[in-house]
């Protein structure tokens, strides 16, 4: 059992499931303002709708992927509407996820979680450990996934499960049985 594979796989698997469920909603539902605004990170504005939560989960992956690979800064909260549909967010997630997982799988294979890199996208540039940024993505997106599950349920969407890595591991086992 490899914990990186489980946590990374579960984070992507669950985010994809939520985006698939969000495809069943219309724009009014996706953009319906929350009663209580939740501010996850001090540099972000509060998450105000389901669409914003889902988009920020994808943006988190895009931003760290850009930092790890030398890519450009994502368009935080300024992406065109066509890039913020659930289907478009799935495509963005798939692109970012492949690079993110590839870089960090190499880090895992080299046992280099304590190694550092300079995030040149920060102003001023900052130094982070690979393990620290992986934990950041898992932690922040886990919180947002729980909020998204609650928002989907409040909109009448049947959401199975509760977002646990146990569900992801079980899905792998059942896929292997087929």
Image: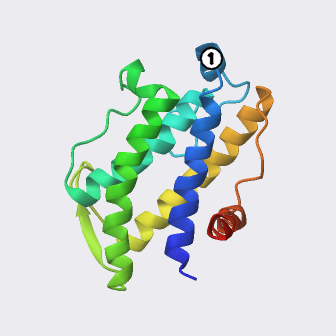
- Residue 169, image x and y in percent? 66, 68
Q: Quadrant for the C terminus, please.
A: bottom right
Count of residue discs: 1
Q: Secondary structure at mark 1?
A: loop
- The crowd level at tag 1 (other Cα within 10 Å; few <14, some 14-19, many 20+) is few
Residue 113 occupies which quadrant of the picture? Answer: bottom left
Q: Residue at x 57, y 70 (%)?
A: 6
Q: On screen, 46 above or below 81? A: below
- Residue 98, image x and y in percent? 36, 56
Residue 113 visible in the snapshot = no
Q: On screen, 86 above or below 146? A: above
Residue 70 occupies which quadrant of the picture? Answer: bottom left
Q: Quadrant for the N terminus, please.
A: bottom right
Q: Residue at x 55, y 57 (%)?
A: 11
For residue 69, side relative to residue 131 (left or right): left
For residue 16, side relative to residue 115 (left or right): right
Residue 98 visible in the snapshot = yes
Residue pointed to by mark 1: 26
Q: Residue at x 62, y 17 (%)?
A: 26
């Amino acid at each position: 059992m490899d914990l990186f594979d489980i946590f990374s796989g579960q984070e992507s698997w669950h985010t994809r499931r939520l985006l698939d469920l969000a495809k069943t909603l219309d724009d009014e539902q996706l953009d319906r303002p929350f009663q209580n605004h939740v501010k996850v990170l001090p540099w972000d504005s509060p998450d105000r709708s389901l669409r914003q939560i889902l988009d920020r989960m994808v943006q988190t992956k895009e931003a760290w992927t850009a930092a790890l690979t030398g890519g450009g800064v994502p368009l935080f909260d300024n992406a065109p509407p066509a890039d913020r549909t659930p289907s478009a967010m799935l495509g963005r997630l798939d692109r970012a996820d492949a690079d993110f997982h590839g870089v960090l799988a190499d880090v895992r294979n080299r046992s280099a979680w304590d190694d550092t890199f300079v995030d040149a996208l920060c102003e001023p540039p900052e130094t982070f450990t690979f393990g620290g940024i992986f934990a950041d993505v898992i932690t922040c997106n886990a919180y947002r996934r729980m909020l998204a599950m609650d928002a989907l349920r409040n909109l009448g969407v049947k959401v199975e499960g509760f977002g646990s890595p146990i569900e992801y591991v079980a899905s792998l086992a059942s896929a292997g049985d087929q």
